[in-house]
């Protein structure tokens, strides 16, 4: 570790707990001292910035600002670095180059990425371990057969501690109010336990959480270490260097203070991401300085991604099991009700079963002006007031609050016993309710250690200790319970349907409601069961397949990411399409990113509907064919022609023909890789069909036959025999023709991502709105060339904006996430739809079609 002490004034203001949520931690102006850094222009020609320890670490000259990078790196190394940038598709995953030897003979592990038109190169002294893929596979193998969430989390903490060697490893889960809870822990015996402890949301500010989503692995080598400044801190335009994706990014002084007050010298965290949201962290603490080598960081990052996928699948499996158990209890209640004349007596007898229906601390029934309860519940004296409150706010629906005293001041007198309530109406005509209760969240903490133990305070005071921050949080959540989740409300709604049917079991209206609820639940059960089994099985196969000889780690990760993205699209379509999807939709999704004026695509066939199994398999097969065509064939830069046709034959089998023609001579591969094996074997193995790939002198031809049981004629088959994805010639876009884009998106980070994509293609005139009302108001004074409308804006939709744009003949597209497509009215059936998360190439292709231009960088 360098001994030089760097003292330099930071452009960031003095930070403490009162303003740490505004600290710009992505532009600290400093790096950690275990490595060095240089920043170049986008093309990697000239050095623009360097860390102050550049010469000390690298052994190269210090006066490099403004000089060509080849002068001190050499042409060969610069060539390798540029190639690494080229094959790295995502700036959030820097290219890793282990054991790179500099011209002066020193060896370093190098990370390089390009962000905001700046190429950032980070050097760290080379580590001994150079097999990150092997390490990641070992770690993944030990958790892949975990069959429940608790087992997965418990195994993970033990495994990460054993493999990475930190003194303490925790899984830290974020609660609905933003606070964090340590749900699993493995530590050195002498350390105090944090298991079960809560930490307030302010301990991890929002801007830090946003970085955890963008950069999924974060290390701190020494909380007492010096901060090495970037020179110059501001460029000629007055902008600091954005280190959002840098491994060496320096640490907030307030966070270092926090760690020191806990006695922690070094830390590492792996983000756990579910459905695009930060679920939690795998947090590691060490009580002496520690640098995790680059090879181990690569392994940890890959392990973290598999852990997130596996956790999501197991959560869905658990949700399915919970729903099944709940409905089994309700079915039992319904069977009993068929032979019971007194509904009130039946409810009271079954209160213990209702207490197990969803997570709660007590249950009560207010019926016929009488009160019955078990567990933690309000006293009988206050039951009439509670019943009147629920009657005034519920409007005959399930109603819930996690802060009852905000609605009923009298509840303060028993808030230590009951702080939250979820009420289920038992009748549409009487004020009778089944109520579930939760205790105050502070009363339900399960401490693993002494919550009153104090830590040494730092120069900013004891408010920076975790015990003090917990005390502040305790005041914030006073008289509040754990919030009720959407799953809780769904189970309560299922109970409402069952109970209403009991109360009106001779009513045809209520019988119809029950039948509809049962159909919806059966569909949900089948959907979740199908999705869990397939996701686990297929992802195991994809991740577990070894890399081929000669392939780099970046190529392996890029191929794996593309395959999982194709699988993700297939499963989204299965959920939206009641168990399957149209073949032409799948083709359009896979071909859209590869359309360009350089190639010609013809795709033609009738409307064919694939079942869920065939849709998932064909998603992977077509992805591999399209990817190979983009790399080596008709969809590559050299151009060519791709012809795809499909039809149902006399026995109902779907015959698909994929034919590529290129000018160059095609050389058949000398060996079969995983992608080729997937194309040739998955259809016969998984579907009982046929698959054959033939190489010709100037192209390839693939013939795929899907059995009739997996493919049927789709809707309006007779009138939908039209070409899909055929290329058009559009007028090229040029800087002299500025494009005005109107973006309606309620999520700030997503809107920023779209703006970055547009700006990368020369589109800078971008206007953003976060609601339909704001958008309609702005449209009164502006006329954009094209618009991008997120369909679902939280409690709002962008459909009113779409009607206004349609009236004014302004072209637009819809953007949709999981299943928002069902919200599009029929009159917008012609409007193109882009799936979220946004794919940059697909976005620019749709804009090009809408404005009759091909938008180029």
Image (cartoon, helix red, strand yellow):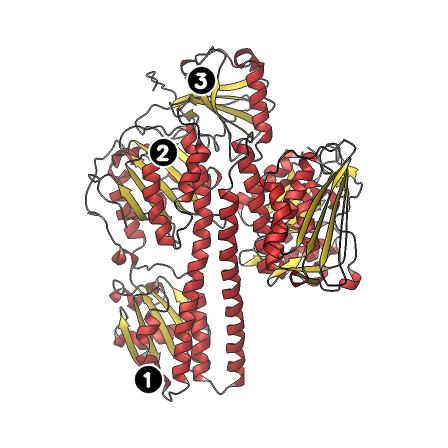
Q: Residue at x 55, y 24 (%)?
A: 237
**Mark 2 Cα shell of 10 Å, populated few (<14), some (14-19), many (≥20):** some
x, y percentage for residue 514? 50, 77
Near-viewer residue (565 or 118): 565
Taking the spot 40% from the left edge, 27% from the top edge, the residue there is: 129
Residue 86 lies, with reference to residue 621, above or below; the image says above
Q: What is the CA distance from the residue labelled 2 to the residue labelled 1?
A: 61 Å
Is the C-beta separation of discs 2 and 1 under 8 Å? no
Tell me: 807 left or right of 526.
Answer: right
Q: Which residue is mark 3?
A: 107
Few, some or many residues within 10 Å of mark 1 (<14, 14–19, 20+): few
Q: Say which element carries label 3.
A: strand
Q: Nearer the viewer, residue 105 or 818?
A: 105
Residue lying furthest bottom: 341
**If the image is split into quadrants, where does the C terminus sit?**
top right
Q: Mark 3: few, some, or many residues within 10 Å (few <14, many ≥20)?
A: some
SS under mark 1: helix
Find disc 1 in the rendering and name its residue: 345
Q: Are marks 3 and 2 in contact (CB under 8 Å)?
A: no
**Residue 706 is at least partly visible in this image:** yes
Answer with the quarter of the image where residue 376 lies: bottom left
- Label 3 vs 2, first from the N-terminus: 2
Nearer to the camera, 799 or 589? 589
Q: Which residue in the structure is indicated by mark 2?
A: 15
Left or right of 604? Residue 624 is: left
Judged from the image, the secondary structure of the residue bearing numbered disc 2 is loop
State the image coordinates of residue 782 (x, y, percent, origin top left): 69, 46
């Amino acid at each position: 570790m360098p001994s030089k002490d760097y003292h330099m004034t930071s452009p960031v203001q003095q930070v403490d707990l009162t303003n740490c949520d505004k600290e710009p931690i992505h532009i600290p102006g400093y790096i950690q001292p275990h490595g060095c850094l240089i920043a170049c222009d986008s093309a990697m020609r000239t050095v623009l910035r360097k860390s102050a320890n550049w010469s000390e670490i690298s052994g190269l000259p210090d006066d490099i600002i403004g000089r060509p990078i080849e002068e001190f790196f050499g042409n060969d190394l610069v060539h390798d670095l540029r190639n690494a940038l080229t094959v790295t598709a995502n700036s959030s995953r820097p290219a890793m180059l282990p054991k790179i030897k500099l011209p002066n003979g020193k060896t370093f592990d190098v990370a390089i990425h390009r962000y905001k038109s700046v190429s950032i190169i980070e050097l760290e002294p080379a580590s001994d371990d150079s097999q990150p893929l092997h390490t990641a596979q070992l770690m993944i193998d030990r958790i892949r057969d975990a069959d429940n969430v608790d087992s997965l989390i418990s195994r993970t903490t033990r495994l990460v501690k054993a493999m990475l060697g930190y003194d303490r490893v925790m899984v830290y889960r974020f609660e609905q109010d933003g606070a964090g809870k340590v749900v699993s822990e493995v530590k050195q015996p002498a350390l105090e336990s944090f298991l079960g402890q809560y930490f307030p949301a302010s301990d991890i500010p929002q801007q830090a959480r946003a970085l955890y989503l963008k950069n999924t692995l974060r290390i701190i080598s020494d909380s007492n270490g010096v901060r090495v400044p970037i020179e110059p801190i501001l460029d000629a335009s007055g902008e600091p260097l954005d280190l959002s994706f840098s491994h060496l990014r320096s640490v907030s002084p307030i966070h270092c203070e926090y760690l020191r007050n806990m006695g922690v010298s070094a830390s590492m965290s792996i983000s756990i991401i579910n459905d695009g949201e930060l679920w939690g962290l795998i947090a590691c603490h060490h009580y002496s300085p520690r640098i995790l080598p680059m090879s181990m960081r690569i392994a940890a990052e890959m392990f973290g991604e598999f852990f997130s996928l596996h956790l999501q699948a197991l959560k869905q499996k658990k949700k399915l099991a919970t729903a099944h158990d709940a409905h089994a209890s309700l079915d039992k209640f319904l069977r009993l009700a068929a032979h019971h004349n007194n509904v009130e007596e039946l409810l009271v007898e079954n209160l213990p079963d209702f207490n197990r229906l969803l997570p709660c601390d007590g249950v009560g029934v207010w019926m016929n002006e009488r009160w019955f309860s078990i567990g933690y519940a309000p006293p009988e004296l206050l039951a009439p007031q509670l019943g009147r409150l629920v009657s005034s706010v519920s409007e005959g629906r399930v109603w819930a609050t996690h802060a009852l005293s905000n609605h009923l001041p009298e509840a303060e007198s028993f808030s230590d016993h009951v702080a939250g309530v979820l009420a289920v109406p038992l009748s549409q005509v009487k004020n009778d309710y089944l109520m579930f209760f939760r205790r105050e969240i502070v009363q339900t903490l399960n401490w693993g250690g002494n919550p009153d133990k104090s830590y040494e305070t730092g120069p900013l005071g004891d408010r920076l200790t975790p015990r003090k921050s917990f005390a502040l949080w305790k005041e914030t959540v006073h008289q509040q319970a754990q919030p009720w989740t959407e799953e809780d409300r769904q189970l309560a709604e299922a109970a409402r349907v069952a109970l209403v049917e009991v109360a009106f079991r001779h009513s045809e209206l209520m019988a119809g409601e029950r039948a509809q609820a049962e159909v919806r639940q059966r569909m949900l059960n089948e959907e979740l069961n199908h999705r869990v089994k397939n996701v686990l099985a297929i992802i195991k196969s994809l991740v577990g397949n070894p890399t081929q000889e000669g392939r780099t780690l970046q190529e392996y990760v890029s191929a794996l990411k593309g395959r999982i993205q194709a699988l993700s699209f297939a499963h989204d379509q299965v959920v939206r399409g009641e168990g399957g999807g149209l073949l032409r939709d799948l083709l359009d999704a896979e071909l859209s990113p590869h359309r360009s004026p350089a190639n010609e695509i013809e795709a033609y066939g009738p409307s064919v509907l694939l079942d869920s199994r065939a849709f998932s398999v064909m998603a992977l097969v077509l992805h591999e064919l399209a990817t190979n065509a983009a790399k080596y064939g008709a969809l590559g830069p050299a151009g060519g022609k791709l012809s795809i046709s499909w039809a149902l034959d006399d026995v109902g089998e779907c015959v698909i023909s994929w034919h590529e023609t290129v000018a160059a001579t095609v050389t058949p591969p000398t060996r079969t890789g995983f992608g080729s094996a997937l194309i040739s074997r998955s259809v016969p193995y998984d579907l009982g069909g046929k698959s054959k790939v033939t190489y010709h002198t100037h192209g390839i031809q693939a013939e795929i036959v899907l059995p009739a049981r997996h493919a049927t004629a789709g809707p309006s088959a007779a009138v939908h025999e039209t070409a899909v994805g055929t290329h058009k010639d559009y007028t090229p876009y040029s800087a002299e023709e500025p494009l005005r884009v109107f973006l309606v998106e309620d999520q700030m980070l997503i809107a920023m991502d779209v703006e970055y994509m547009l700006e990368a293609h020369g589109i800078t005139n971008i206007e953003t709105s976060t609601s339909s009302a704001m958008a309609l108001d702005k449209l009164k004074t502006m006329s954009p060339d094209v618009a991008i409308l997120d369909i679902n804006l939280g409690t709002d939709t962008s459909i009113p904006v779409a009607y206004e744009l349609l009236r004014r003949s302004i072209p637009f597209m819809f953007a949709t996430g999981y299943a928002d497509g069902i919200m599009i009215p029929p009159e917008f059936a012609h409007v193109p739809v882009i799936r979220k998360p946004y794919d940059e190439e697909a976005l620019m292709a749709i804009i090009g079609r809408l404005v009759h231009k091909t938008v180029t960088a």
